[in-house]
Amino acid sequence: MQIYLPIAEVSVNAFLLLGLGGIVGILSGMFGVGGGFLMTPLLFFIGIPPAVAVATEANQIVASSFSGVLAHLKRKTVDLRMGTVLLVGGLIGAALGVQLFNTLKAMGQVDLLVKLSYVVFLGIIGGLMFFESLRAIMKTRGGAVTSTRRKHFWVHNLPFKMKFRTSGLYISVIPPVLVGVLVGILAAIMGVGGGFIMVPAMIYLLGMPTKVVVGTSLFQIIFVTAFTTLLHATTNFTVDMGLAVLLLIGGVIGAQIGARIGVKLKAEQLRILLAVMVLAVCGKLALDLLIMPSELYELGPGGEH
Amino acid sequence: MLRVCLALLTLIALPAKAEVVVAGLSQNRVSITATFVGSEILIFGAVKRDAPPPEGDPLRVVVVVEGPSGPITVRRKAKRYGIWVNTDAVVVDQAPSFYAVATSASLRESISQIDDLRHDITIPQAIRLVGEATETVNPRDFADAVVRIRTEAGLYNLQEGAVELVEDTLFNTRIALPANLTEGEYRTRIYLTRGGYVASQYETVINVQKVGLERWVFNLAHEQPLVYGLLSLFIAIAAGWGASTAFRMLLRS
């Protein structure tokens, strides 16, 4: 069934959108990532204008994360205090990010920078997670016990310390705020929740227990993407309500299924799966930049260079 | 005095315009709704004569439908540091969002080059480009790219022989409007030609508009963006919460 999207001004198949939402929703629930890093490029491929895809995806992530957060709040796997600290950084970052997005859009370089950021971030994080998980799996097989505390010494030496009971941490608020800012910028520029960078940062940089990482990142993502949605809606008019609703109907159901699958899998397996997926998306985007495109020209709205 | 008489005489001697085109459309209004998948407009008409058809060059019909025009920025990619990036940009001053030409014979048989220029009939005539060529950038390449990309998207097309002409009097053709239409007035022109020169022309307008919910959403998004943004969030959160509750209840029962 073809449906016309009023803001994107294109016709797409409604079931295709529902299906995309569902698949990405399952991944979102499993890994605690917003799923935006998969959905945004997929929306490009089906012909949604990039600016609309990024802004609408932010809106859709709010919804898919909302049902995920409800599931995690029920199981008490959300560190609300840490989430709030991350959120403060996230709001600052989102405001900066939308500004940057609009500047780059006027310069005609927004696609390139979005893609380059994807390749760089996904490449680094996917690679790190992959090898780290591999090592962890090797070690558990060898019977060795790993200490999760030893590499975070410098985090403990910064000022403004705060107690995070749910995570069992007593650390400075500076690293989580900075992580929040970075995630906020990415949310605004790349149309992602930022889970793919926040989850590893929480595990490796802040040393949070894997159990609360997923719920806490979803909690922060909800508010940052909501803020991003409002900024894009008021400055670019690129949030497509119809597109968002279709994506999220599939997405929320998928997220519920995903959260249930996630509980059954081991943390290392979960991480290595996510790492493989991150690397696959990174590889595809890198190829797009390296291989000569079949059409060298592209059309944009007029009036600006 | 003599000159006036001569002028009057020549006026009388000239035959009245021998052939006039009268035409109609199957619809003057195209409504873009949620389920809009494109539309097909039937353009039909007849040739009105008050004398027998002239001998010589056969009658041809050319139909042109043109969507609203606007400037577009065309960007070209080049390889820099191993990756493909946008380097050069040219602003094409005017390019129609939609352009369809249908003729009753081959293009050049239907319209001469001179009358094509005079009446702006073929696609290249519809694109206005003021930019000057520099060492690296030839604006013509960019204008060609507009035509190529929009032709591939089904927005520009030339259909030679698509106008059906019956007994040199009745004609009809169908113009397909794709789903990704821009709102606005679509100027529709019909030309009768003989020997490639325009003998008569008729002009009308097709209105393409978003209607109903689509229009309301579009207007709200542009006129009250904050309200629209908040509404989008509310709908998203309500649907997210609703679906998760519904799903849980489904599992429990």
Image (spheres, helix red, strand yellow):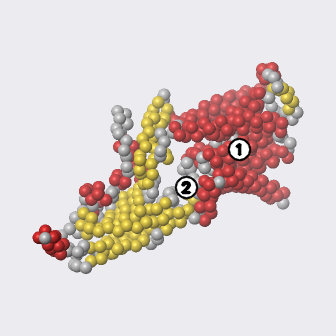
Q: Chain of mark 1?
A: A
Q: Chain of mark 2?
A: A
In this rendering, position of residue A174 left or right of residue A230: right
Q: CA distance from mark 1 to mark 2?
A: 24 Å
Checking the image for residue A227, the label placed there is 1
Looking at the rendering, in which quadrant would you find the N terminus of chain A?
A: bottom right
Checking the image for residue B159, the label placed there is none
Q: Residue furthest right?
A: A165
Q: Quarter-wise, where is residue A75 in the image?
A: top right
User: Contact (CB < 8 A) between labels 1 and 2?
Assistant: no
Residue A3 drawn at (x, y percent) = 59, 60
Residue B210 drawn at (x, y percent) = 55, 62
Q: Is residue A133 visible?
A: no
Q: How many marks?
A: 2
Mark 2, residue position: A9
Crowding near the residue tagged with mark 1, few <14, some 14–19, many ≥20 C-alpha atoms within 10 Å? many
